Image: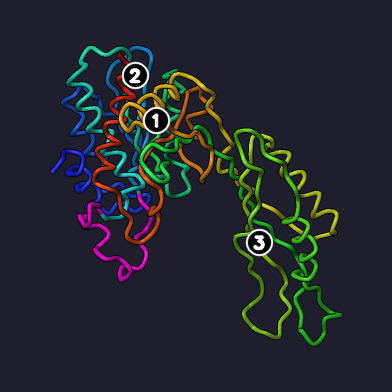
Amino acid sequence: MSATLELLKELIGRASVTPKDEGCQDVLAARLAPLGFRDERLNFANTQNIWLRKGDTKPLFVFLGHTDVVPAGPLEAWQSPPFEPTVRDGKLYGRGAADMKGSIAAFTTALERFLAAHPDHRGSIAVMMTSDEEGIATHGVVKVVEVLEARNEKIDWCLVGEPSSDQKIGDVIRVGRRGSLCAKLTVKGIQGHVAYPELAENPIHTFVPALKALTEEVWDKGNAFFPPTTLQISNIHAGTGAENIIPGSVEVLFNLRFSTELDERTIKQRTQAIFDKHGLNYAIEWRLSGNPFLTAKGRLIEAAHAAIKSVTGDDTHDDTGGGTSDGRFIAPTGAEVIELGPLNASIHKVNEHVGLEDLEILSSIYEQVLVNLLT
């Protein structure tokens, strides 16, 4: 069994459903301590965070990841228990195999090989882990970054192990992400009996024209790096469950994934202008999950492209698709940030898995990135 596979099995066996860590970070700390990494715990609320650093000089390269995973879902749908890592047909199955314990195992073994071969590398290396990425991410990397910024501990390059690959390892790297803005809208009406609509005001009826306008709004056309901004309604709830009562209010949840063509303030203004135009009696609560970010061409992207070409023989594609990641908290510090990890086809699904060969390829790519930047 390879060192990467062995470590990944140990991590998957710990049922670290967000925001739990279940000792995963202890495993990593013990593994990296002999290599000279200092162990600093930066825990907030119920979130476990760890900052492992070797060296004090510039430049600082960071591997960023999360030890928490999403819930397993219906156990009967799994071909093998989600927290009992199982090898089958050249793949390792288990919750977190691809998102993102596979990456964590791969960059740990990459570090071991790199440091054995290059004990006198330049600069410093750190590993940042949180147990609050798959949740609402309020006490994880965002808090760790605040600590680092307060003491002027600046990251130069950050590689996030999110599953970026599409058809084969390294065919896609994320060089940015769209912003994410969530909203909870409450449209108020007057509750009443369905037989006496003249004595009530149905908020669903008043909201429908505004809903049509909201979903048909053309927010922008995107740009060379980002697709156009999109809005999706994720939930609509109204009524008591009885069929003869006009509801007194309707609650609507929606989300915008926005490009660098927009900002939070503009989105709010345009959204509220639509509601005001339709005369709604409403209240709205906003939550910014993250602003869009983009890493311009630089040393990190060049190093990643060269590493992928060296290990796989293939070129890679820069992309900004997908959801959000903890990279959104690192980018505002001025660091170059990319995401590079396993295939994303099985993430958050039952029977999540990672290819055994892919694990070794990924670990070799990570090692070569370190060589390209720090030697």
Q: Residues within 10 Å of mark 3 (few under 14, many from 20)?
A: some
The dominant secondary structure in magenta is: loop
Residue 109 in view here: yes
Q: Give the residue pinned by disc 1.
A: 159
Give the x, y percent position of residue 98.
34, 48
Q: Residue furthest front?
A: 313
Q: Where is mark 3, residue-wise?
A: 252
Q: Quadrant of the N terminus?
A: top left
The kind of secondary structure element at disc 3 is strand
370 displayed left or right of 214: left
Whichever of labels 2 and 1 marks the residue nearer the N terminus, that label is 1
Check disc 1: other Cα within 10 Å, few if <14, some if 14-19, many if 20+.
Answer: many
What residue lies at 69% left-to-right and 67% top-to-bottom? 250
Whether residue 142 is visible, yes or no, is no
Provide the secondary structure element on which disc 1 rests: strand
Q: What's the residue type where badge 2 is placed?
A: Asn
Amino acid identity at mark 1: Leu
**Residue at 73% from the left image edge and 72% from the top image edge:** 248
Q: Give coordinates of residue 3: x percent, y percent.
A: 16, 38
The one of 155 and 177 positioned closer to us in this rendering: 177
Residue that carries the numbered disc 2 in the rendered image: 372
Q: Quadrant of residue 252?
A: bottom right
**Separation of disc 3 and disc 2 at Cα?**
49 Å
- Label 3 is placed on what type of residue? Val
Numbered disc in front, either 2 or 1: 2
